[in-house]
Image (spheres, grey):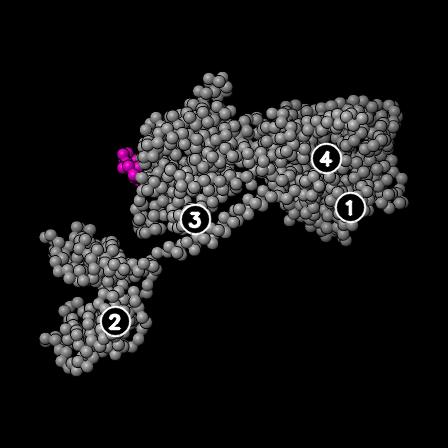
Amino acid sequence: MGTFANGVHPHGSKALSAGCPIERGPEPKAVYVPLLQHIGRPAVPVVQAGERVLCGQLIAEAAEGLSANVYSPVSGTVKGVLGHITLSGKKREHILIENDFTEEEMFLPPLADRSREGILARIAEAGIVGMGGAAFPTAVKLGTDKKVDILLVNGAECEPYITCDYRVMIEYTQAFLAGVRLCMTACGAERAVIGVEDNKKDAAALLARAAGENVSVRVLKTKYPQGAEKQLIYACTKRTVPEGKLPADAGVVVVNVQTALAVQRAVEENIPCYERVMTVSGKAAGRPANLWVKTGTPYRDLAVFCEGKEDCGRIVSGGPMMGESVFSLKICTGKGTSSLLFLDKDECENRNASACIGCGRCVQACPMGLSPVFIEQALLGERWEEAEAYGALQCIACGCCSYVCPASRFLVQSVKLAKKKLQERRAAANVRGGKKDV
Amino acid sequence: MSEIANYRSAPSPHRSDGASVRRIMLDVLIALLPCLVCGVAYFGLYALLLVFLCMAACFAGEQLYNLVRKKPFTFDLSALVTGMILGLNLPPRAPWYIPLIGGVFAIVVVKMFFGGLGKNFANPAAAARVFLLLAYGSVMASYIGAQPGDLLADGETGATWLSGGALAGSFLGVRGYWGEILQLFLGNIGGSIGETCKLAVFAGGVYLLARKVIDWRIPLVCCLTAAVFALFFYGSARDMLRHLLSGGLLFGSFFMATDYATSPKWKINRILYAFGIGALTMIIRRFGIYPEGMSLAILFMNLLVPVMDRFILPVRFGQTDKNGRPVPHVAAWTMRGLCIALAAVLAAATPAYAAAEYDEPQKVALPASYSFIRGMAADRDRVYYFTAEGEAYLDEYNYTQPLAFEIEIDTASGVVRDIRPITQSTMGYKAELSLFIGKTYEEVAALTDLSADSNLSATFTNTALKGMVEECFLAADFDKNRKFERGGEYIVDRAHSELFGGTAFLAAGSAYLSEYDYTQPLLYYIVVEGDTVSSIVPLMQSTMGYTAELSLFLGKTRAEIEGLTDLSADSDTSATHTNQALKEMVLECLAAGGEK
């Protein structure tokens, strides 16, 4: 059973929704489709206010550089491009489409060319991005020019509550495996490994039976953050991605379960990426579920659909370890939104930071081998070299340090801030250095 | 559905493992309770008062400091933990002002002056103990012996084992070395209030380990290192174990060295830190002027912790050097290697040392069924340990008193080393052990006046004991220079006799006493010198008066004995039968041949 060093063991809480078959999600009256649902630049709208669009019609085109196409998730009328709040608190541009509930659909043209280039082009065209949360454009990732021999499929789903990938693996097994094979072709990998945590043994067994040649299933220890990219690569292949390098440098490309499914849908069913499977769960959700949710669906629609309870203490988009707290139900889903959790008051931690007692649990828990306690001290004392020496730049923001902290300190936020400051200082130093050269 | 309105926003993660500072401190207090209970049981209620005063001083000191500095009051229990640890570190009869001064010093000077919880550079309890040791040397060095159960006792002044005090040598029925170890382990000895009972320390330590409050590496490596150093410093496996179970080593390594603020944060550094503490403790004990070194060692290693934390860092996941090569885990493997090396050295050296100084008595099989001896053991120095059972008929009471003694015969000096009664009359008719202890075989055999003052029963007991001691002498003598095992019809064993010179035979036979239709087992210790019989000591024959007439055989040669025809004793057929049986035995011994 593969695993990695350190990490933590939060209670899985997956039983709430693990048994719920995937169903159709809410059909929103209006969708706010974000132009930025991915890492990189916002897409550029190609529709005007008042224009009628069909479900699956291109509404925004990838900008130059790192970006992705955006498709309409409903048929209806474009009301305009307007600023709308996002989870980060910033207002960003969204395309507002009023749903006319005719469900008129539009498909991509059938794909004849199933070569590497053909598939990559189709992935880019369909606007597929990484669906694990980081939302990196998949075509760019798979189109690496480095020699890749293993395609790693992230089925670890290490965050508590989330079960959407698990449901996809057992309900869409064949489509998912077809997607894996298409991704293998797209990145030129000889074999694929599907990493599954051992709390999903049935999925692992099912996949192992259906996998076929060159695709294997690796059962991983249930431990957080087993699904973090570098940890997953180590657990599945014993390869270590050097600091500052990409997985492709170690000959590996990692894709999420739902990314593989989206690739299959785009290539074989000609459906572009405008919806995904999400988990809505938590004890304050009256009806936990795994749902096909259209991008741009307001969280309020999901709350209504899943009967979010009044005494809900906190709403979290994503998992409880890394997910962000939702401050408004007006916020809309995107391609990378994997779950929405309605946590009641006993389920979530209310942190009141007290003085650090120096127990060192954060050091023992950090899967990256950092020393969060000292990074925080260095940050507060503005000793940047020290912060760097303790590894602030390598933080993956998994939150293990905060999770174990008996003094409830905001360690992961401190380390993230230190990382940001260090990156800014580095950028500033580069600018200064550049000027000197001139 | 009504609108969800009362939810709050908060930074991730939205879960925690439930640990809190107060819970951790509470766990430590719980873990210290067994030590406190044992300390009070051994040293009385005054010890409880000391610990309580110390905790009160620590708590009050912290709150007063907060008041003066206009800071919020703190109720995280950490001051109570410090107070309890320091209190348990005090001598049981320290004056009342010692815990007050120590507590205030620990909290105000060591902890609050440096920024309060988590920011102190030294362990408050260890620092305060060392401060008290320096400032109140004589007070802090005066200990009392343990008085289990006597809660109001004044206590008698006595040195701890580390400062030269003696151990009882026998504890709860376990004798010798393991008795000492048991005594040390259960803590029925002089020492600081909380540190003497190792059982309580282990109980608390295991609780903390189970609750994952402390890192197992620190106590384990600390004790491992101390064991290896003790083994080589004292050259003795026995002293190693005594040292491990003495003083504050265990208490310190479980409760003081594991203090969060002053121990390294990375697990690998903790190994180095614990190694330093274990080594320094033993160096101080062996070469320093103080009998105990745990607090000093902890304090010194505390000072090195910031350096370790800053310069020995965990290798990050995927860390590479300038050339892009992975950084090797040097520190981790060095420390793991150190642990393995320590364990290996200990595992290899302990049996070697233990074998070299092994003097636990080893059981010796009894060559024959002796009258009194029921068990027999000998150590390397040829000290024999006997368990002998007999009985004394107390005329006055018409009562047969069973007797059992443990008798030690030192064959090197040829004297009775010790006699310990196991069973004898509890009514005052006790054997007078001084009649025998330190005496040689001749002296014991020559004892005629066994009377105790006007106490006939005691005299009977003494007489019975004399027989046991004599038998023990002979059995020891016999076992010491054994030549061969069984041979012939009667000879059970043969040996060179140091008591008599010549060759000793243990001959067992029987005589059929036709009058009684009873077969009497017989056992004689027969010494042959050249070709004559020099001594015969009956070990088992009838006690009813039908004893063999030894003079018939003594000093005679084989031919003379063969020529003996009249073995009849005066009008006593049974004695004649016994004589006849003895004649056969003697002849067999003579045939086997004595040394010249």
Q: Can residue B112 be seen in this snapshot?
A: yes
Q: Which is more foreground, mark 4 or mark 1? A: 1
Q: Amino acid at mark 4?
A: Gly
Question: Mark 1 sits on what residue?
Answer: A148
Q: Amino acid at mark 1?
A: Val
Q: CA distance from mark 4 to mark 3?
A: 59 Å
Q: Earlier in the sequence, mark 3 or mark 2?
A: 3
Quadrant containing the C terminus of chain B in the rendered view: bottom left
- Residue B520 on image: x %, y %: 21, 72
- Residue A19 on image: x %, y %: 67, 41
Q: Residue at x 31, y 39 (%)?
A: B159
Check whether the beta carbons of the residues at disc 2 and disc 4 lie within 8 A of each other. Answer: no
Q: Is residue B274 left or right of residue B444?
A: right
Q: Which is more foreground, mark 1 or mark 2? A: 2
Q: CA distance from mark 2 to mark 4?
A: 96 Å
Q: Nearer the viewer, residue A309 or B75?
A: B75
Dot 2, crowdedness within 10 Å: few (<14), some or many (≥20)? many
Question: In the figure, residue B12 lies in which quadrant?
Answer: top right
Check whether the beta carbons of the residues at disc 3 and disc 2 lie within 8 A of each other. Answer: no
**Helix, strand or loop under label 2:** strand
* Range drawn in magenta: B144-158
Q: Which mark is residue A374?
A: none
Verify whether residue B514 appears in magenta.
no
Q: Is residue B585 above or below residue A142?
A: below
Q: CA distance from mark 3 to mark 2?
A: 45 Å
Q: Which mark is residue B503?
A: 2
Q: Is residue B402 above or below residue A114?
A: below
Dot 4, crowdedness within 10 Å: few (<14), some or many (≥20)? some
Q: Which mark is residue A133?
A: 4
